[in-house]
Amino acid sequence: MSMTFAEMKEKLQSRLKPSRFQHSLGVSETAVTLAKRFGVDEEKARIAGLLHDCARQYPNDELIAEAAIRGIAIGDVERETPLLLHADIGARLVAEEYGVEDEEIQQSIARHTVGGSNMSDLDKIVYFADMIEPNRDYPDVHRLRQLAAEGTLDEMVLAGLSQSISFIVNQGKLLHLGTIIARNELVLKLKAARS
């Protein structure tokens, strides 16, 4: 089953709250802009950006059950913050409900919330687009948008991961290992590039 982008959009709109759907459109457009800038497949960025939050159709209190149905690992961090599971569930849901079999798109959706090891450029673009799309409004979003215009992809994502870690620590919540691994890899990669 293969759907057009317009069909995906229509289906997504029928399943998400209006504000979440608007956010998804913003991420899709931002991901395309970043894909153009960094030479990444624009169509994959457009689809991944649109569908990155497709699993938000489920209420938070259903995410653990939805993950279990799909055999997705549920650790202490996910039990403490079930919302994180929407990324992994979404990666499966795009195949189940939207006919998206592309593994790069699926992986970028799985990683858009906490990152992960050896992030691809598409992973990084969807992760960062989610943070800076036009509907986002939080302290420092302007600094991250500035980086999107001037920085390298790795510098941008490192700043995003660092900001995310600070926010989570300040809230007294558990850090996901994927976020720490992704940040450490980028710190080492950028350090190696400078030396």
Image: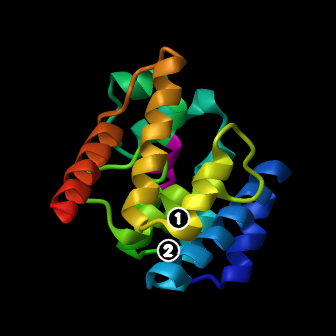
Q: Please give the range of residues in magenta.
A: 86-91
Q: Position of residue 82 (x, y in %)?
A: 51, 29
**Can residue 137 be found in the magenta stretch?**
no
The residue nearer to you, when weighing 39 against 96, is 39
The residue nearer to you, when weighing 193 against 51, is 193
**Residue drawn where x is 68% and y is 51% of the image:** 142
**Residue drawn where x is 43% and y is 55% of the image:** 157
Q: Position of residue 180 (x, y in %)?
A: 30, 37
18 in relation to 40, above or below: above
The colour scheme applied to this rendered structure is: rainbow
- Tell me whether circle 2 and circle 1 mark residues in contact (CB < 8 Å): yes
Residue that extends furthest to the right in the rendered view of this protein: 18
The residue indicated by pointer 1 is 94
Residue that extends furthest to the front in the rendered view of this protein: 195
**Residue 100 - label:** 2
**Residue drawn where x is 74% and y is 81% of the image:** 6
The residue nearer to you, when weighing 192 against 55, is 192
Of labels 2 and 1, earlier in sequence is 1
